[in-house]
Amino acid sequence: MDTTTSVRDQILDHAITSMMLRGYNGFSYRDLSTLVGVKTSSIHYYFPSKDDLVLEAVNVYSSGVMDALRTIDESLPADTKLSKYTMMFGKILSDCSQICLCGMLAADIESLPDNIRHAVQAFFRANESWLAKVLAQGAKEGTLAVNGKPENAARALYAAFQGSVLASRLFSTKARLEDVEASVKVTR
Amino acid sequence: MDTTTSVRDQILDHAITSMMLRGYNGFSYRDLSTLVGVKTSSIHYYFPSKDDLVLEAVNVYSSGVMDALRTIDESLPADTKLSKYTMMFGKILSDCSQICLCGMLAADIESLPDNIRHAVQAFFRANESWLAKVLAQGAKEGTLAVNGKPENAARALYAAFQGSVLASRLFSTKARLEDVEASVKVTR
DNA sequence: GTCTATATAGTGATAGAC
DNA sequence: GTCTATCACTATATAGAC
């Protein structure tokens, strides 16, 4: 199999993808055990409790998304930035029916401890503030339709993205995700 | 306790609220057994399998929401209709941290059989088409900002509502739900 | 219709050998 | 670090008495 990636990283990787598919209550150490090829007791060695594992999964996932956002060139027009953002959601969706890990954990939040809730909140806030800057830029450039303050519009837009990946997977089509992007782009 | 409601109805009621809180994989026959005050075997008498229970729960929940939509007077202005729609989401949120059952099941969809998926899809479509009519009306009345075709804008808006209840519960505030409503209302 | 009792399998987690 | 073995518990589900 994979001889370059550490067992710890493989566990985290499969934990992330499993949760993006079935959520916190929908995967087990046993599932990961099968996927990685080690016993469940070995997983407990790296992550004593399931919550330890999930918290670290959120941190790793968040770092990855933040890195991806930084690769979107600051100098691009706002509507281009938004298209790239939309594609980030679309890729994992069409590849393997996965939705954003933190969107999924937001649904499972009542089963989760406070430290994980805080990590998910931080992820939401980071995305909302990135979108707020893009919306402000797009309003100035005349390419994005922003109603009200960019901060409020960004929270509504981010909610729309999270909801639309749910719907897109439900209907097995990216159409609803694209509807969201279209809903803020100025038509000429 | 409740002497007027049948055991079957109590089971369904608690199944619905449990799932709105923790999702499909986050509640058990045992939980319901405690809540209703009957043994798990009695629940199996009414609903042989968990999927039987969940499917019926979706049907009951959907009927309730459809009835609520019908109580919103056809002759009202579009922005008033939208406010009432927003309040439907807000009520269950602030009362007991519950999100829309079908939004929750959309997150759990990869754990569910096809017949439940179809029921959830039907619920989404019904809401989207109701919102499309409201948006079309609001565009004509000049009170709602609709970008593109009402059908597409409605899908984006419904996604925003579903995503915003997730975020609202995550942050324990209705603010994000209200951001969505504000994002489509025309500011004067 | 509700119960007791039970079947079968899965859960997160730990002790201790190697 | 990974394993075997095991714990205590929970899951959905069924058989059969009352």
Image: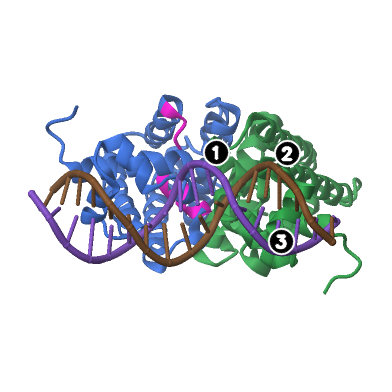
Chain colours: A blue, B green, C purple, D brown
Position of B101 compared to A95: left or right?
right
In front of the other: label 2 or label 1?
A: 1
Q: Chain of mark 3?
A: B
Q: Earlier in the sequence, mark 2 or mark 1?
A: 1
The residue pinned by badge 3 equals B39
In front of the other: label 2 or label 3?
A: 3
Q: Does residue A70 belong to the magenta stretch?
A: no
Is the C terminus of chain B in the top left, top right, bottom left or bottom right quadrant?
bottom right
A184 or B119, which is in the foreground?
B119
Residue B178: quadrant of the picture:
bottom right
Residue B123: assigned label:
2
Marks 1/3: CA–CA distance: 25 Å
Q: How many marks?
A: 3
Query: Same chain for the residues at labels 2 and 1, yes or no?
Result: yes
* Residue type beneath disc 1: Ser
* Residue stretch in magenta: A96-107
Residue A176: quadrant of the picture:
top right
**Marks 2 and 1 in Cβ contact (< 8 Å):** no
Marks 2/3: CA–CA distance: 31 Å
* Residue type beneath disc 2: Phe
Where is residue B99 shown, x and y percent of the image? Answer: 63, 55
Q: Residue at x 40, y 31 (%)?
A: A92
Residue B111: assigned label:
1
Q: Give the main secondary structure, helix, strand or loop, of the magenta stretch.
A: helix
Where is residue B18 shown, x and y percent of the image? Answer: 65, 58
Q: Residue at x 68, y 60 (%)?
A: B32
Position of B121 compared to B110: left or right?
right
**Marks 2 and 3 in Cβ contact (< 8 Å):** no
The local crowd at label 1, few if under 14, some if 14 to 19, many if 20 or more residues have their Cα within 10 Å, is some
